[in-house]
């Protein structure tokens, strides 16, 4: 099992706080969405009034999850917020600004549950377990500590967090805790076949065509140890892609034999660039991301930058090469 003990203060807060908001990071991925859905459902078992709020819309890939249509998305707060909110559960955010909702949430009691390196330990209670394979695995343990029933929809949502954050149980965070939790969740009703269909056999056509657009930009550097690729607004427009359709594309350059680190550069509507980083083995891209103001995990991290184009690419490639050299 993962090693960080659940703080008694967190259990007490969740038992006693009657009106809760659950949120996670901007541009939500499978762990963020599955954990948010599961946490909201579990807290309602305690008889709490619970609302889920994410800044950005769910990628189409995750809209099949039961209850996903109940998540409030957008910068405008849900009805009754903040006057009908006693505390906020913040999932998978090493800092509050990762929610994209920090202006609205600042000043409220925050319950911080995360597994990222570099978490700032903000909030009235912070439970940070960097050994956890997914925040969903932490939510599963929390449900057990609270004595809550794991219903089928909750089991599916939490199983999905494990599949997505471990790359289908392929990445280095595929620990015994990941398999232990996965086995328990299947026994509670999670369906690996259903979740695999959602993730791997329900892609919109535009997402598949986006793979082709991205691969045309593929380059390798540093004697084949680093791969880079780009995702521009024009590329997305050509295939009618929606936000979220690019999730998982970085795994294609990462699959090249000999590649130890990957950077994918994506243009944002605000003129910034988002850089996603992936690596193999002991190559620490979290340190690279932190150098540019971002963060994440050892093998999966990212950052945003005001820089664009070749200057950004050269700086990132240099930093990745240094990280490989330290390995």
Image (tube, helix red, strand yellow):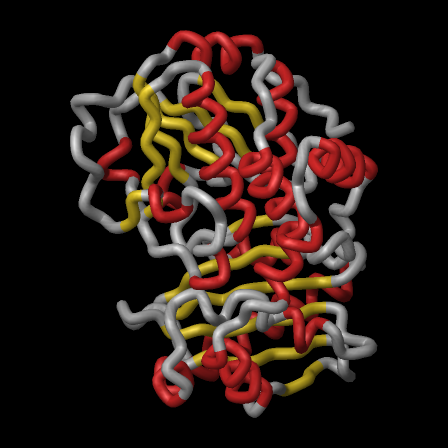
The image position of residue 39, as x and y in percent, is 48, 30
Q: Is 150 on the left or on the right of 120, as rendered?
A: right
The image position of residue 185, as x and y in percent, is 69, 35
321 w.r.t. 83: above or below: below
**Quadrant in which the C terminus is drawn:** bottom right
Residue 115 seen in the current view? no
278 w.r.t. 74: above or below: below
Residue 135: quadrant of the picture: top right
Q: Residue at x 32, y 40 (%)?
A: 53
The image position of residue 271, as x and y in percent, is 29, 72
Decide which of 41, 31 is in the foreground and name it. Answer: 41
Q: Looking at the image, how many numbered discs can be counted on the residues? A: 0
Decide which of 118, 249 is in the foreground and name it. Answer: 249
Q: Is 224 on the left or on the right of 96, as rendered?
A: right
The image position of residue 56, as x and y in percent, is 34, 54
Q: Residue at x 54, y 51 (%)?
A: 30
Q: Residue at x 43, y 27 (%)?
A: 122
Residue 3 seen in the current view? yes
Q: Residue at x 73, y 80 (%)?
A: 222
Q: Is 196 on the left or on the right of 205, as rendered?
A: right
Residue 16: quadrant of the picture: top left
**Quadrant in which the N terminus is drawn:** top right
67 w.r.t. 290: above or below: above
């Amino acid at each position: 099992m993962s090693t960080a003990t659940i703080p008694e203060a967190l259990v007490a807060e969740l038992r006693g706080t009657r009106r809760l908001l659950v949120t996670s990071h901007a541009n939500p991925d499978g762990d963020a969405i599955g954990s948010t859905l599961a946490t909201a459902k579990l807290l309602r078992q305690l008889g709490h009034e619970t609302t889920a709020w994410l800044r950005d819309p769910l990628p189409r890939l995750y809209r099949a999850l039961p209850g996903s249509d109940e998540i409030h998305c957008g910068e405008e707060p849900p009805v009754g917020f903040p006057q009908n909110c006693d505390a906020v559960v913040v999932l998978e955010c090493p800092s509050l600004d990762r929610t994209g909702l920090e202006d609205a949430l600042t000043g409220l009691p925050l319950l911080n549950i995360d597994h990222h390196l570099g978490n700032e330990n903000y909030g009235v209670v912070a439970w940070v377990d960097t050994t956890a394979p997914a925040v969903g695995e932490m939510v599963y343990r929390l449900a057990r500590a609270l004595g809550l029933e794991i219903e089928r929809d909750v089991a599916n949502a939490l199983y999905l967090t494990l599949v997505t954050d471990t790359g289908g149980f392929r990445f280095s965070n595929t620990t015994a805790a990941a398999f232990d939790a996965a086995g328990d969740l299947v026994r509670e009703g999670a369906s690996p076949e259903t979740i695999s269909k959602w993730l791997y056999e329900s892609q919109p056509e535009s997402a598949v065509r986006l793979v082709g657009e991205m691969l045309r930009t593929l380059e390798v550097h540093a004697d084949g140890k680093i791969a880079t690729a780009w995702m521009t607004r024009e590329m997305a427009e050509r295939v009618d892609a929606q936000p979220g359709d690019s999730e998982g594309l970085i795994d294609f350059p990462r699959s090249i034999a000999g590649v130890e680190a990957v950077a994918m550069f994506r243009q944002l509507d605000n003129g910034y660039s988002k850089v996603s980083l992936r690596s193999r083995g002991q190559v620490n891209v979290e340190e690279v991301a932190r150098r540019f103001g971002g963060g994440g995990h050892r093998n999966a991290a990212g950052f945003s930058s005001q820089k664009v184009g070749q200057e950004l690419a050269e700086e990132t490639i240099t930093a990745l090469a240094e990280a490989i050299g330290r390995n």
